[in-house]
Amino acid sequence: MGTWILLVLASILLIGYGIWRAGWHIRLPSPAEQREVWTGSLFIYAGCALSLGAAVWSGARHLGARPPAAGITPGEESQPGQSA
């Protein structure tokens, strides 16, 4: 679990840094600023890739989860006030 959360945090940091580095331009940026925007977008893409990796990892963990103990299938848990 520790590695997964680090992957998620790294993706958030990369996306945030990419947005900060790219900046928001209302007008067409100069060539030097265009390079900064391009570099920032690469950080955003890397963060998105890490985020997708974390989502796949989370799905794989969910599918590989062990079944509940004592032979209870999901949805068969007794409700309060019902006899077992």
Image: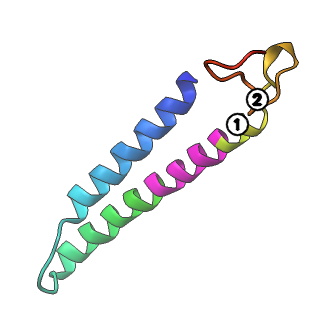
Q: Is residue 51 found inside the magenta-colored segment of the image? A: yes
Q: Are marks 2 and 1 in contact (CB under 8 Å)?
A: yes
User: Which image quarter: residue 13?
Assistant: top left
**Above-or-below relation of 53 to 8:** below
In depth, the one of 28 and 80 nearer the eye is: 80
**Above-or-below relation of 73 to 50:** above
Which numbered disc covers residue 21? none
- In the picture, measured across the screen, residue 11 lies left or right of residue 64, that is left
Image x and y of residue 52, in percent:
56, 53
Q: How many marks?
A: 2
The magenta span reads 47-58
- Near mark 1 (Cα within 10 A), the count class, few <14, some 14-19 or many ≥20, is few
Q: Which residue is depicted at the point 47% across and 56% down?
A: 48
In depth, the one of 35 and 69 nearer the eye is: 69
- In the picture, measured across the screen, residue 65 lies left or right of residue 70, that is left
Image x and y of residue 39, in percent:
33, 64
> Magenta part mainly helix, strand or loop?
helix
Image x and y of residue 23, in percent:
18, 65
Q: Is residue 48 found inside the magenta-colored segment of the image? A: yes
The residue pinned by badge 1 equals 62
What secondary structure is marked by label 1? helix
Which amino acid, mark 2? Ala
- Near mark 2 (Cα within 10 A), the count class, few <14, some 14-19 or many ≥20, is few
Q: Residue furthest bottom?
A: 28
What secondary structure is marked by label 2? loop
Q: Which residue is depicted at the point 88% across and 19% down?
A: 71
Q: Which residue is depicted at the point 53% across and 55% down?
A: 49
Q: Which residue is depicted at the point 12% across and 81% down?
A: 26
The residue pinned by badge 2 equals 65
Image x and y of residue 38, in percent:
33, 70
Q: Residue furthest left?
A: 27
Quadrant where the image shows the N terminus: top right
